[in-house]
Image: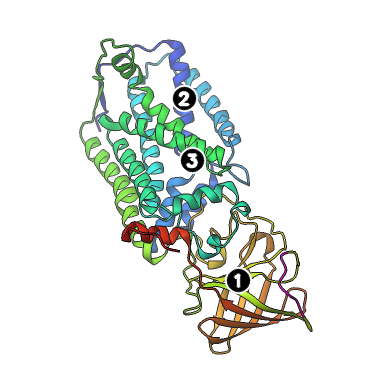
Amino acid sequence: MPSAIATQQTYWTQGAKIAFRFVFVYFFLQCVPLLDWRYYQLVFSVNWLSLRYEDIFNLAHYQSSFFTGGQSFVNWIVVAVPALIGAGIWTTLDKNKTDNYDRLYYWIRVIVRYRLAIGIVAYGFIKFFPLQSPYPSLSNLNTNYGDFTRWKLFSMSLGVVPHYELFLGLVEIIAGLLLFWRKTASVGALIVLFFTGNVFMSNIAYEGGEYVYSFYLIVLALFTLAYDAPRLANLFIWRRPAQPNRFRLLLVGKQKYVRRILKGFVFFFFVVLYGFKTGSALKKDPYQIPHEKGLSGAAGIYDVSLFVLGHDTIPYSKTDSTRWQDVVLEKWATLSIRTNIPVTVDSCNTEKLGAQKDIDRTYESQGSNERSYYAYKADTVSHILTLHNKNPHYKNDSLVLNYQRQDSSRIILSGINQQKDSIYIVLDKIKKKYLVKEAEKSGRSGGLKL
């Protein structure tokens, strides 16, 4: 098969060649995780016959990780070591050869901008179809502001304005699409720099967990933009004549068809298919929200009007460590209890898609210190609720309670608590209006009444 032909080759100094060899190997390993066995474990764990949008996101979001725990810049150093070794071997073998470095530079830019494109589009669609930051739950709306972590407050602030979240997603999608074509790649990279730079600073300011990954996208965008940056600087900053990019890689024979097939596959898989499945999931299976429905007609906040522990009736108290203060039942099968007992916060603040069990869908309970969240199963025949704490710090916390519904506004619970004491609880539904919801209505009707 004939090789690709490059036009208008430039002169490379020996120092530039040595630096480029390291850059080439480093960015190749950053974009193609050849050294990380976890990536291939992820690939083989996907059910390709029943592909979900979460699977595609996880593949697009993956970044090489060689240590357990959260994301870390240490992984970048690990990648740099084989890159240095590879560059050294390359330099030794290339002493008497004349590799076409313009062509190699072209191909590494292709790899980097495609990796950047699928990474930014992956986040774009879960914002465009507001999945990343859902509307705050009833439990969230009944939690004191100071009992949330910074990142949870940021996420909920985005969740209450889904149209703005949609707009942010659209910006990311447009930037990603521009990166798929060489002529518009620099424009896409520039948008990514401004947008993801803001995401990076938000992660720093609000103690988010994606600051390493967002900086990774920034570095890829800088590399993509670097090729045209001198020309753009001459034209817009220094107001000097700027030479156009006349380099072309002429693919001949079957190479043209291979290129079209590969590009078409990547675009279809990470844009068309992923976008379709993400849009379908907005109503069917949003990954942050449990999919099991709760007790019919029970959603709301309930005052604990009677709390009996053993044989003692405990009166309402803000300071009592045993009495429940209020209970919230969501539309889905989550029940949250506010008590005076400090809760070890589930501070997970990284993007995790793919949880199939409701107990593992912990967004509603993450970053909250005031309430205990339980996933429950309701036996509507025997009138039994089986509760399991959703906080990973309390994996062994579970309750089995009998329930009675005297009417639509009262629920009676009875059973044994975690300390093996009998409990009897009467819950009375509170008719409560929420300012954020009333404000939305006022935007449509023209007035706000509480």
Residue at 46 percent of width and 30 percent of height: 219
Mark 1 neighbour density, 10 Å: few (under 14) some (14–19) many (20 or more): many
Residue marked by disc 1: 327
Q: Is residue 387 above or below residue 183?
A: below
Q: Amino acid at mark 3?
A: Pro
Cα–Cα gap, marks 1 and 3? 47 Å
- Name the N-terminal-most of marks 3 and 2: 2
- The N terminus appears in which quarter of the rendering? top left
Does the magenta segment cover residue 65?
no
Of the image marks 2 and 1, the number of the one nearer the N terminus? 2
Question: Circle 3 sits in a helix, a strand or a loop, which is it?
Answer: loop
Determine whether 81 is above or below 354 in the image: above
Relative to 421, is 55 on the left or the right?
left
> What secondary structure prevails in the magenta region?
loop
Rendered image: mark on residue 71: none
- Looking at the rendered structure, the kind of residue marked 2 is Val
Answer yes or no: is residue 132 visible: no
Location of mark 2 (residue): 23
Q: Position of residue 48 (x, y in %)?
A: 40, 59
Name the amino acid, label 1: Val
Are the residues tagged 2 and 1 within 8 Å (C-beta)?
no
Q: Find the magenta span and give its range.
A: 313-318
**Residue at disc 1, secondary structure:** strand
Task: Give 266 or 357, whichever is nearer the viewer.
Answer: 357
Q: Which residue was labeled with disc 3?
A: 33
Looking at the image, residue 186 lies above or below residue 343: above
323 sits to left or right of 352: right
Whichever of labels 1 and 3 marks the residue nearer the N terminus, that label is 3
Residue at left offset 62%, top offset 51%: 146
Q: Position of residue 263 (x, y in %)?
A: 29, 42
